[in-house]
Image: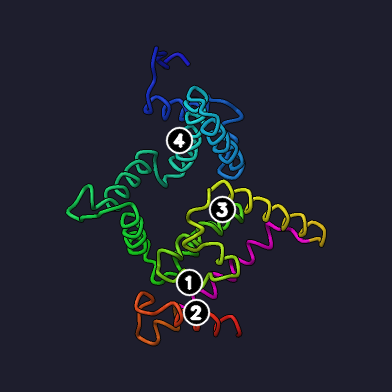
């Protein structure tokens, strides 16, 4: 393009302008045809490539792949700019405000002693800003499009921070005691990896998709969690005020329905 200025070094503003040009009337035929759905998988692929660069400690590749992810962000933002919905600046503005709001211990007067308190406070702020009225809402906000294992892990993390993690009790919890803390993490890594692999192999043999099975189990867990939370609320109590035995009794009651 005759009015495009070539530079030795470009910045984020240049990237936004380049994508705008590619999507313009005289731009690239392929770029003009794309929408959110047509390039959805590209976003996922680029993200995985970033993770691979991180795993390989390849900083040069990481720089390149982060650029590809940034391109995806700018591209999706440009589509919405054309729809008069929002711009890339709006995206940047919103995430900046989110970071400021969720870090009152940095940008405000709140005092915290450790990362655990930071995460718990983050959840409480997120619950308010997203108008999540129950802890179940916070569990349901974990995207269902995540791989089942990743989703179930994040759900259990959030459940633990509510003070109701006891309802996850299972025979496997016997592995997690004071003595277990002294065992090399690699031993647990191997044990858990082999156990998961054996379950996947078993699922294959009986004709069950383990991904689907875990997604359904996580959905069921969230629903039961919500029932436990509702019972506690109707009793006018807080989960943090109940003993492990009291929480377990409520959980057992819900499971028997």
- Which residue is found at the position 64% from the left and 50% from the top? 193
Q: Which of marks 4 and 1 is nearer the N terminus?
A: 4
Any mark on residue 22, and which? none
Q: Earlier in the sequence, mark 1 or mark 3?
A: 3
Label 1 secondary element: helix
Q: Is residue 27 magenta?
A: no
Image x and y of residue 141, in percent? 48, 61
**Separation of residues labelled 1 and 2 (CA atoms):** 7 Å
Left or right: 121 with respect to 74? left
- Residue at the disc numbered 4: 74
- Which residue is found at the position 53% from the left and 69% from the top? 168
- Residue at the disc numbered 2: 248
**Separation of residues labelled 4 and 2 (CA atoms):** 48 Å
Residues at circles 4 and 1 in contact by the CB criterion of under 8 Å: no
- Residue at the disc numbered 1: 166
Mark 1 vs mark 3, foreground winner is 1
- Residue at the disc numbered 3: 150
The quadrant of the picture occupied by the C terminus is: bottom right
Image x and y of residue 103, in percent? 27, 50
In the image, is residue 209 above or below residue 90? below
Q: Nearer the viewer, residue 246 or 20?
A: 246
Q: Which of marks 3 and 4 is nearer the N terminus?
A: 4
**Separation of residues labelled 3 and 2 (CA atoms):** 25 Å
The span shown in magenta is: 208-228
- Which residue is found at the position 70% from the left and 52% from the top? 197
Q: Which residue lies furthest to the left in this view?
A: 109
């Amino acid at each position: 393009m005759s009015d495009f200025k070539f530079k030795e070094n470009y910045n984020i503003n240049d990237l936004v302008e380049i994508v705008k040009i590619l999507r313009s009337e005289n731009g690239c035929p392929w770029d003009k045809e794309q929408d959110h759905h047509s390039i959805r998988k590209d976003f996922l692929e680029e993200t995985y490539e970033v993770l691979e660069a991180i795993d390989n400690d390849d900083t040069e590749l990481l720089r390149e792949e982060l650029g590809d992810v940034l391109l995806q962000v700018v591209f999706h933002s440009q589509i919405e700019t054309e729809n008069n919905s929002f711009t890339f600046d709006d995206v940047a503005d919103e995430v900046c405000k989110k970071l400021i709001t969720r870090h009152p211990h940095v940008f405000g007067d709140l005092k915290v002693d450790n990362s655990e308190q930071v995460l718990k406070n983050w959840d409480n702020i997120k619950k308010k800003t997203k108008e999540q009225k129950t802890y179940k809402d916070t569990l349901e906000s974990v995207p269902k499009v995540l791989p089942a294992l990743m989703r179930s892990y994040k759900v259990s993390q959030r459940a633990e921070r509510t003070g109701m993690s006891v309802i996850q009790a299972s025979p496997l919890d016997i592995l997690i005691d004071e003595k277990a803390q002294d065992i090399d993490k690699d031993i647990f890594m191997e044990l858990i990896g082999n156990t998961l692999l054996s379950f996947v192999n078993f699922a294959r043999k009986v004709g069950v998709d383990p991904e689907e099975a875990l997604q359904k189990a996580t959905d069921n867990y969230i629903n039961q969690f919500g029932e436990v939370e509702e019972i506690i609320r109707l009793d006018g109590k807080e989960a943090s005020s109940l003993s492990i035995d009291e929480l377990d009794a409520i959980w057992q009651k819900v499971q028997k329905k």
